[in-house]
Image (cartoon, rainbow, N blue to C red):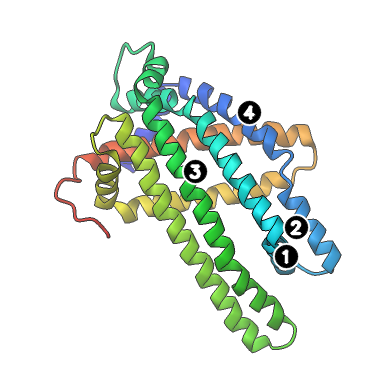
Amino acid sequence: MGILSNTLHTLYKKPLIFILTVIAALPVCYISQFNPVPALFSGFGSIGKSGVLSSVVSLLQFLWEPDIFRNTVLALIAVSFLTAVITSLYLPGYFNILNHAVLEYKGKRRAFGDGFRRFFTRILLVNLRVAFVVCIFVLFSIIALVPALVLSRAVSGNNPQMFLVALVIDVITAVALYFVLMFLRVYILYWYSSIINGFKKPFRTGKCIADSSFWRIFRSMALYDIFFVCCYVIIGSIQNDIVSFLVKLIFYTMFFSLYFSFIFNSFKINTASYKGTKALF
C-alpha cells in the first residue's frame, strides 16, 4: 500500500509526467490504429472457417515459411533498432524527471535536458541490448508456441481426451513464456532505474534490488498486466475510430504514468533493503 500511495503522490506533485506521457502516447495510439494483427487473425479465421486457435496456428505457420520468416526477422530487427534509437531521445529526460519527482528533488527546472545530457549514451546502449533481447524472446516464443498449438489443433476435433492434454501443454508453455517475460521486464526496468540513480554497475545493482522483493514486484506487475488486458479488450470493442483513439490516448497516459511511477517508487523503497540480498539465480 505504501508503494501505491507514493506512486499517486508522485503524480500529484509532478503533473508534468502526464504531459510527457501524452507526448509519447500520441504516436503509439496512432500506430495502434493501423495494427494489422487483429485483421490477420480475422482473415485467417474466415479462410479456415474456424476459431481463435486455428487463426493463431495459421498465423504462426504463415510466419514460419522460410522467406516470410526471414523477412519477419529482418523487419523485427529493423523496427527494434529504430525503436531503441528513437526512445533513447526521450527516455533519459522522462526518467530523470520521474526520478526527481520520486526523490522529491526541488528546483530542477531543466531535468529533462539534464537527463538527456547525462544518460543518453547509457540509455541508448541499454536500449540496443534490450532490442536484441526482445528479438530473441519473440523468436523463441514463436518456436515454443508453434508445436504446442499445432498439436492442439490436430487433435481438437478427433480426440477430446488428447485435446485436453494438448491444452494443458499450451497453458504450461504460455505460463512459462509469461514468467520469462516477467523476469526480463523486472530486471530491465530496474536496470533503467539504476542508471538514472547513478549506480556504477547498473544491471547487477538493479538485479540485486529487484531480487530483494522480486515476488512482490511480480505480483504487482501481474495485476497491472491483468488490468491492461481487460481495459484493452474493452477499448477494442469501440467501433468509432475517433472515440477509440481518444479513449486509448487517455488510457495509455494514465496507465503508463502510474506504471513507470510505480517502478521508480518501488525501486526507491527496495533500494534500502537490497544489501546482502541473495540473487534468485
Q: In 3D space, how far apart are the residues under numbered discs 3 and 4 (Cα atoms)?
A: 22 Å
Label 2 belongs to which residue? 41
Question: Given this view, does label 2 or label 3 mark the residue nearer the observer?
Answer: 3
Q: In 3D space, how far apart are the residues under numbered discs 1 and 3 (Cα atoms)?
A: 29 Å
Q: Residue at x 76, y 32 (%)?
A: 242
Q: Earlier in the sequence, mark 1 or mark 3?
A: 1
Give the number of the disc on residue 160. Answer: none
Label 3 belongs to which residue? 131
Q: Earlier in the sequence, mark 4 or mark 1?
A: 4
Label 4 belongs to which residue? 26
Is label 1 in contact with label 3 (beta carbons under 8 Å)?
A: no
Is label 2 in contact with label 1 (beta carbons under 8 Å)?
A: yes
Q: Residue at x 84, y 68 (%)?
A: 49
Mark 1 falls on what kind of element? Answer: helix
Q: Earlier in the sequence, mark 2 or mark 1?
A: 2
The amino acid beneath tag 4 is: Leu
Which class describes the residues within 10 Å of circle 2: few (<14), some (14-19), or many (20+)? Answer: many
Q: Residue at x 29, y 26 (%)?
A: 103
Q: In 3D space, how far apart are the residues under numbered discs 2 and 4 (Cα atoms)?
A: 25 Å
| Residue 162: % across, % down | 63, 86
